[in-house]
Amino acid sequence: MKFLKKYGFLFLLAALIREISLPFFLNFFNEIGKHVWLLSELGRPGMPLQGAFKTWEIIDGILFILAAPYLYTRYKRYSSKLAAGFGWLVALYGIGDCIMTALFDYSTNYFTSMTAFLHAFGSFLGSGALLLINLFLLLLARKNQQSKTFVGIIFMMICSIVAGVLVEVKLFSQPLVSGILQCVMLDTLYLPLLVIAVKDTLLWIKKIFANFKS
């Protein structure tokens, strides 16, 4: 646990980079994206990259869970209860939006089977957790009078909500456009966490070089 509290930012950084890069590695923006509406459809039975998608998401879910103790340690100086909630939300995102959506197959009708319902429930759980994570960071930025960070997070959340609404109403008839909007919806909510992970990683690298020079 001490290792996770100290170096969990590396797991968080790895998880976020993997999540953002997943569509590129699975060829989502090329041929495959012309035929599927959402990223989750890559894990449907019969899809050529079903196994790769499921394995990728399970690994990412585990990485998010491993990053939770670090986030608690990072923010407990502000409030131990809020920090604990923040850590649990990150773990919940890994469980819901990554592991559950990988284990249970996607369906356009959530009530056709128990697996379809559990997939939808996991996705809903994860998306809610990710929104609450950004809300936590927003409140923290306001408390610390970090106006630029505050405005940046609000902008990212608005972009995510707009993209999510456009995906749900299916305003565009092209599956690829819907897939891109889903990526925008997720990636804009990943960015605040990514900034934190990159910042702490750079500080860690800087300390290594400082110790090496001394």
Image (tube, rainbow, N blue to C red):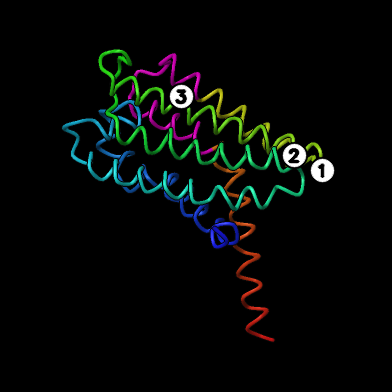
The answer to whether marks 1 and 2 mark residues whose Cβ atoms lie closer than 8 Å is: yes
Magenta stretch: dominant secondary structure: helix
Which residue occupies the extreme left position in the image? Answer: 46
Which residue occupies the extreme right position in the image? Answer: 145
- Disc 3 marks which amino acid? Phe
Q: Position of residue 41 (x, y in %)?
A: 29, 30
Magenta segment boundaries in residue numbering: 164-187
Q: Badge 3 local density, few (<14 within 10 Å), some, or many (20+)?
A: some
Q: Mark 2 and mark 3: span between their CA atoms?
A: 24 Å
Q: Secondary structure at mark 1?
A: loop
Residue 89 drawn above or below residue 109:
below
* Image quadrant occupied by the N terminus: bottom right
The answer to whether marks 1 and 3 mark residues whose Cβ atoms lie closer than 8 Å is: no
Residue 83 drawn above or below residue 200:
above
Q: Secondary structure at mark 3?
A: helix
Residue at point 66% right, 85% down?
Answer: 213
Residue underneath mark 3: 124
128 to the left or right of 137? left
Residue underneath mark 1: 144
